[in-house]
Every structure is written in structure tokens, then in C-alpha cells.
Image: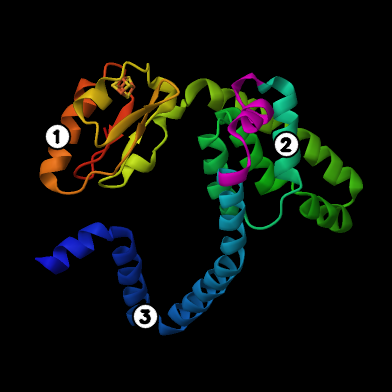
């Protein structure tokens, strides 16, 4: 039973291991090559990710929310788009490194459109990439591709910004047992604090989480406070289903 639970919780990992096992049986040569590639990318990730995590910690702890909102927020306008384009373009490292940074920026108030611009420019128009492109394919090729790509990125960003909202994105509360308050939805009525003063408190007219709930019984009580919140600002995942 325990093995089934472990497999259920790590479905993707289990499927990858299964795929490797099958390839080893069918074609040991290709399997060895594939393991070699995986090790290569694993080493690359281990080299890049610590720096990226350090950067996200710096953003979380030292960069004021107002600064991010001013630079990359909903009201930053075209200037914010250009700043996002610059940030993505001068970045270094593989694009998966951009995701934790994007998440931190989103959490601090960056808009969806600007995150799309950062991710896209990071992926396809980084300065080192452009330099190599010009060297191998010529300056004209690089410049025209850059122009068309930037136009496409801006169109994509505006479309994404219109259709995808922050509330559609997974939050920390998608992890089991994590209690979270979506600040932008909280109307400051104070009901959660009145109901469960051990778990919520009011700060600057907004509710914040004071303590994470532990145990099934407590989780049930917290769940009730989630349901009673008038603006549905509280997110809590008791059994793997975020609310
Ligand atoms: S009950 Fe909801 S809206 Fe009211 S303070 Fe708590 S989180 Fe905010």
C-alpha cells in the first residue's frame, strides 16, 4: 500500500524510470546515450540553479514590491514592456532558469504580459545568442529575425495578458497543507482573524497567515474559514485540491 502511495505521489518520476527500463531492455546502447544526456543536463542544472535561487531570494527579500510594480506591474505600460524586454535580453543561462525568477516577479506584482516578454526574450533573443547568430548567419539575418521576433513577442504578451489572469496560475497553496491569502482579493473584513486568531492576523488592513495549520482536525477548521471568506481570498489545499 505504501509503495502505491509513493508511486502515486511521484507519477512523473516513476514513468521516466519505467521509460528508461524499457529502453534498456529494447536498446541498451541508446539507453546508455540517453542516461549520458540526462547526466549532462543534470550537471548543467546543478551549476545554474543555485545562482538562480540566490537571485530569487534577493528579489524576495531585498527588492521592494513597489519597485517591481512600478517597473513591471499592470500600470507600467509600454515602458514596462521595454524594461521586460531588456531584462530578458541581457539574461544568461538556459530558459528554465527564468521560471523561478518569473514566479518571484509575479509574486511581487509584475504583470502577466511582462512575464511573457521576459520569458520569451530570455528564450530566443538573448544578447549572447544574437552575437552568435550574427557571426554564423550574418548581421542582416540576425537583425530581421530580432525585429520580427520582438513584434511576435509583444503580440503574444498582449494576448496572454488578456486571456490569462493571475488567479488562474497555481499558487503555493497547490502544495498540500499550505495556507495562503491572495492579498489582492482580501477586502480586509477581518472575519478570518475573528474566526481563527491563531492562524490569521490583520496587517495594514489585510489578512496574513500567522501559522500554518497542521493535522487533519485543524485543517478541517481552517477549511471552514476558507469557505466563509467573503471575497474568496484564502487558498488552502487540504488533500491535494487547492481551493
Ligand atoms: S475573511 Fe477574507 S476578506 Fe476578510 S480579512 Fe480574511 S482574508 Fe480578507
Residue 73 falls in which quadrant of the image? top right
Residue 5 falls in which quadrant of the image? bottom left
Label 2: which residue?
85
Name the residue rendered at 90%, 43% in the picture.
Answer: 140
Magenta segment includes 96: no
Label 3: which residue?
24
Disc 1 versus disc 2: nearer the observer: 1
Q: Quadrant of the C terminus?
A: top left
Q: Which residues are magenta?
A: 61-75
Q: Quadrant of the N terminus?
A: bottom left
The image position of residue 60, as x and y in percent, is: 55, 44
The answer to whether mark 3 and mark 2 are in CB contact below 8 A is no
List the single residue furthest toward the right.
Answer: 139
Label 1: which residue?
221
Q: Exactly how many numbered labels are in the figure? A: 3
Residue 151 vertical position relative to residue 30 in the rendered view, above or below: above
Magenta segment includes 71: yes
Nearest to the observer: residue 117 or residue 132: 117
The CB of the residue at mark 1 lies under 8 Å from ligand 1: no
Mark 3 or 2, nearer chain start: 3
Amino acid at each position: 500500500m505504501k509503495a502505491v502511495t509513493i508511486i502515486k505521489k511521484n507519477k512523473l518520476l516513476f514513468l521516466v524510470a519505467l521509460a528508461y527500463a524499457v529502453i534498456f531492455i529494447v536498446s541498451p546502447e541508446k539507453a546508455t546515450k540517453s542516461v549520458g544526456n540526462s547526466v549532462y543536463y543534470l550537471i548543467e542544472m546543478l551549476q545554474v540553479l543555485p545562482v538562480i535561487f540566490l537571485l530569487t531570494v534577493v528579489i524576495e527579500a531585498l527588492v521592494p514590491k513597489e519597485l517591481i510594480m512600478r517597473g513591471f506591474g499592470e500600470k507600467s505600460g509600454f515602458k514596462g514592456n521595454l524594461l521586460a524586454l531588456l531584462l530578458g535580453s541581457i539574461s544568461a543561462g538556459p530558459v528554465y532558469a527564468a521560471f523561478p525568477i518569473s514566479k518571484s516577479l509575479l509574486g511581487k506584482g509584475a504583470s502577466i504580459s511582462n512575464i511573457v516578454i521576459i520569458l520569451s526574450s530570455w528564450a530566443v533573443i538573448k544578447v549572447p545568442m544574437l552575437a552568435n547568430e550574427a557571426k554564423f548567419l550574418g548581421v542582416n539575418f540576425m537583425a530581421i529575425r530580432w525585429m520580427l521576433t520582438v513584434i511576435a513577442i509583444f503580440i503574444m504578451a498582449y494576448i496572454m495578458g488578456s486571456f490569462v489572469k493571475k488567479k488562474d496560475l497555481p499558487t503555493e497553496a497547490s502544495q498540500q497543507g499550505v495556507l495562503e491569502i491572495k492579498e489582492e482579493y482580501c477586502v480586509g473584513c477581518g472575519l478570518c482573524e475573528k474566526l481563527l486568531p491563531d492562524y490569521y492576523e490583520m496587517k495594514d488592513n489585510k489578512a496574513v497567515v500567522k501559522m500554518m495549520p497542521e493535522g487533519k482536525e485543524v485543517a478541517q477548521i481552517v477549511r471552514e474559514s476558507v469557505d466563509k471568506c467573503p471575497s474568496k481570498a484564502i487558498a488552502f489545499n487540504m488533500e491535494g485540491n487547492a481551493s
